[in-house]
């Protein structure tokens, strides 16, 4: 942090004085930045009109930003139309997740966007310092030819590194323990708990048959199979060797366990078909006597829970289940880094000034501004210790969603270097989403093996990308279909297993594995 503060101090001295000091001009410079809304409801926000963060940045830097917006849905199609018509902004500010490395390379080859690696040391001291310290970030943003075409953002959330967790409805779990049962640790403990939920009128409404012990979606299969064999739904690394997670005998035994839960009526019959809104409807019921969902699997409980109806700490995470042979593991997902938060177009007339403007968000102060907005408007310091263990913490003036709706801060999706210390700098108050996210992550991270994860940020050639897309469309789809079939009983784990393996072989599973190995080795 000291290095950051030194860099920021130097930048602040450079910015001191009249507006326009950053660019060295008397009149404010103007740039056009493009961003995407996260959801349709974000349309209430307009950084061009009365947003205090926008006004603060213009006053500090002397740079005026004209903001353009892409819709939350179909953003990539709209972007491609703009580029095809030669309608370029100066830069893309907020990462549009569907932009692929191949698209970046294609735009660079056509000289539509600018390579940044030679400009960063001179105009982006904050970001350059991060590149020196974080080889994983440097690797993620650098093409095989050594070029940097976009800037990253880090989330800082430990919970995103373990993106599937088992949650259980707290009041029912407490009743289960109060009945003399022990904490749920093993797969058999979990089975026993679900059976208890099914056999008892847990919500006390007089109907002993309306409880759904385990609901949610198919992501729960990952949590329930991992005690038997590592399963992430696709390929993973075993001592650096690409391996399929869906062909082993352990995987079959894991599916057999899930099928037993299914056959016992412990799993929602709609597990493989319902969407998020349908799950949320089941979960978010005002009266406790109307609540029927005993548990689900998700990144965090907020995926389904509406905190205005069901407080965040109502559903509690239980750690990874231990299998019959003592195996206790979960899937590590390297999802902290995204690398499309700053893409600069060759039509930009004063790129150095815009790079300096972007670089501010890689300082501690800039990241705090991106994540929480302006002190005194969106948040204040509190003497309450933070979730991350700092002596003081951030106390929001209003919930983040309210601040966005009132156009009082920016969406926290632009370029920044958010560390766990910043991510969890809010106060450690029970019932808040921050402490809930942190605690659930701490239950899972000790059992997550980072070495097994294949980075989603690996660069591919256009040919590799096309071939990989075909493999995923065929093999991943087939595996998902068969997982559902094996669990629901439309296919037999005894009679149809060899046919399943033979079909994968005929679909060239080995070629899929070899292609992924080639991509992994090239990025090593």
Image (tube, rainbow, N blue to C red):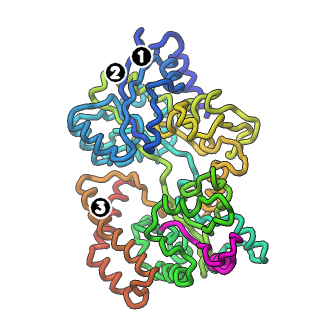
User: How many C-alpha atoms fall within 10 Å of the one at disc 1: few (<14), some, or many (≥20)?
Assistant: many
Residue 108: image x %, image y %? 26, 38
Distance Cα–Cα, label 1 vs label 2: 9 Å
Q: Nearer the viewer, residue 424 or 50?
A: 50
Q: Nearer the viewer, residue 354 or 432?
A: 432
Residue 72 image-quadrant placement: top left
Residue 85: image x %, image y %? 20, 35
Helix, strand, or loop for circle 2? loop
In the picture shown, does residue 59 fall above or below 191? above
Count of labels in the image: 3
Pointers 1 and 2 in contact (CB under 8 A)? yes
Residue receiving disc 1: 23
Most extreme residue toward the bottom is 495
In the picture shown, does residue 5 fall above or below 275? above
The residue stretch that appears in magenta: 189-217
Distance Cα–Cα, label 3 vs label 1: 44 Å
Name the dominant secondary structure of the magenta segment: loop
| Residue 159, numbered label | none
Residue 213 is a magenta residue = yes
Distance Cα–Cα, label 3 vs label 2: 39 Å
| Residue 468, numbered label | 3
Asked whether residue 104 is in view, the answer is yes
Residue occupying the point 45% across, 70% down? 272
Residue receiving disc 2: 350
User: How many C-alpha atoms fall within 10 Å of the one at disc 3: few (<14), some, or many (≥20)?
Assistant: some
Quarter of the figure with the N terminus: top right
Which badge, 1 or 2, comes first in the chain's sequence? 1
């Amino acid at each position: 942090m000291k290095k950051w503060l030194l860099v920021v101090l130097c930048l602040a001295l450079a910015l001191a004085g009249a507006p326009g000091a950053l660019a060295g001009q008397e009149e404010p410079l103007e740039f056009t930045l493009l961003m995407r809304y996260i959801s349709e409801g974000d349309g209430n926000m307009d950084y061009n009109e009365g947003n205090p963060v926008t006004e603060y940045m213009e006053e500090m830097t002397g740079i005026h930003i004209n903001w353009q917006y892409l819709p939350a849905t179909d953003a990539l199609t709209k972007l491609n139309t703009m580029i095809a018509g030669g309608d370029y902004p100066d830069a893309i500010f907020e990462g549009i997740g569907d932009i692929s490395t191949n698209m970046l390379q294609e735009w660079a080859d056509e000289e539509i966007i600018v390579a940044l690696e030679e400009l960063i040391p001179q105009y982006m001291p904050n970001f350059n310092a991060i590149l020196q310290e974080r080889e994983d970030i440097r690797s993620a943003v650098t093409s095989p030819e050594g070029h940097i075409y976009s800037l990253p953002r880090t989330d800082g959330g430990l919970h995103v590194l373990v993106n599937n967790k088992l949650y259980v409805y707290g009041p029912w779990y407490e009743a289960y323990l109060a009945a003399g049962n022990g904490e749920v640790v093993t797969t058999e403990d979990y089975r026993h708990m679900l059976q208890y939920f099914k056999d008892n009128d847990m919500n006390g409404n007089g109907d002993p048959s309306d409880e759904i012990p385990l609901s949610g979606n198919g992501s729960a299969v990952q949590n329930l199979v991992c005690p038997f064999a590592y399963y992430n739904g696709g390929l993973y690394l075993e001592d650096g060797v690409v391996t399929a997670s869906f062909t082993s005998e352990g995987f079959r035994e894991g599916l057999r366990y899930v099928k037993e839960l299914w056959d016992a009526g412990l799993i929602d019959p709609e597990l493989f078909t319902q969407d998020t809104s349908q799950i949320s409807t089941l979960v978010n019921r005002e009266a406790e006597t109307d609540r029927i969902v005993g548990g689900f699997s998700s990144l965090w409980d907020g995926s389904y829970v509406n905190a205005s109806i069901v407080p965040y700490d109502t559903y509690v995470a239980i750690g990874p289940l231990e299998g019959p042979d003592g195996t206790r593991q979960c899937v590590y997902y390297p999802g902290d880094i995204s690398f499309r938060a700053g893409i600069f177009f060759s039509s930009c007339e004063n790129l150095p000034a815009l790079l300096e403007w972007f670089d501010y968000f890689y300082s501690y102060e800039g990241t705090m501004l991106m994540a929480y907005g302006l002190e005194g408007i969106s948040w204040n310091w509190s003497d309450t210790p933070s979730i991350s263990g700092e002596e003081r913490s951030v106390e929001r003036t209003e919930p983040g969603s309210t601040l966005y709706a009132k156009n009082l801060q920016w969406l926290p999706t632009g370029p920044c270097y958010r560390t766990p210390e910043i991510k969890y700098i809010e106060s450690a108050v029970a019932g808040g989403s921050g402490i809930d996210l942190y605690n659930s992550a701490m239950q899972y991270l000790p059992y997550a093996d980072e070495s097994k994860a294949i980075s989603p940020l690996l660069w591919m050639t256009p040919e590799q990308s096309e071939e990989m897309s075909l493999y995923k469309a065929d093999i991943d789809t087939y595996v998902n279909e068969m997982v559902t079939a094996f669990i629901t009983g439309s296919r037999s784990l005894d009679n149809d297993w060899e046919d399943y393996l033979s079909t994968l072989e005929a679909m060239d599973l080995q070629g899929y594995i070899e292609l992924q190995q080639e991509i992994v080795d090239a990025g090593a």
